Image (tube, rainbow, N blue to C red):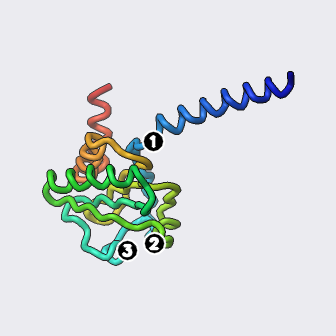
Amino acid sequence: MVGIVVLGVTLVVGVIIGFAVRRRDGKVRAVKQVVSDARAVVTSDDLGVELGERVTLVQFSTAFCQPCRATRRILHDVAEMVPGVRHVEIDAESRLDLVRRFDVMRTPTVLVVDDAGNVVKRASGLPRKADVIAAVGVAVDGPSHESSHQSDSV
């Protein structure tokens, strides 16, 4: 009898955790800015290419990651659609220094980087195209515009 109760509790907890992970998967969220932390800034040297004029979409991927392919297409489409936006894909396995520095826990992870190299948004998992476009808008306009847009919609 105790075994059945333990099994039931384990299943319920597993389902709850699964729903929580699924709900959070791919959500683009704001990043807390730490002004004095130079490690939070992305540079051209980190990426091996120049940053985008307005925004850089940095994607951490691995060779075996299925959602990374769909993320690549989404970010590529957004970069072609919006002038001044560049998409850069980084192999997480070969750039462990950046993985540690930006706390990449899974792939795909997307960093939305403004023209100064500050990470303004991030997503873990497959993001929606509309969310990426909105994040690019925030990075271009700056965080002060985001809070005014949010208060307008409330």
Q: SS for tag 2?
A: loop
In the image, 51 versus 149, the foreground residue is 51
Residue 37 image offset from top left, x and y in percent: 47, 66
Q: Is residue 118 left or right of residue 53?
A: right
Q: Earlier in the sequence, mark 3 or mark 1?
A: 1
In the image, 5 versus 79, the foreground residue is 5
Q: Is residue 110 left or right of residue 104?
A: left
Q: CA distance from mark 3 to mark 1?
A: 26 Å
Q: Quadrant of residue 33?
A: bottom left
Q: Judge whether 13 appears above or below 30 on screen.
A: above
Q: Earlier in the sequence, mark 3 or mark 2?
A: 3
How many neighbours does mark 2 have within 10 angstroms: few (below 14), some (14-19), or many (20 or more)? few
Q: Residue at x 23, y 56 (%)?
A: 76
Which kind of residue does numbered mark 1 sit on? Asp
In the image, 138 versus 98, the foreground residue is 98
The mark found on residue 25 in the picture is 1
Q: SS for tag 3?
A: helix
Residue 7 image offset from top left, x and y in percent: 75, 29
Q: Identify residue for label 3.
A: 46
In the image, 106 versus 36, the foreground residue is 106
Q: Residue at x 49, y 59 (%)?
A: 104
Q: Residue at x 47, y 39 (%)?
A: 24
Which kind of residue does numbered mark 2 sit on? Arg
Q: Work out whether residue 40 can be spotted.
A: yes
Q: Do the CB atoms of the residues marked 1 and 2 lie less than 8 Å apart? A: no
Q: CA distance from mark 1 to mark 2?
A: 23 Å
Q: Identify residue for label 2.
A: 95
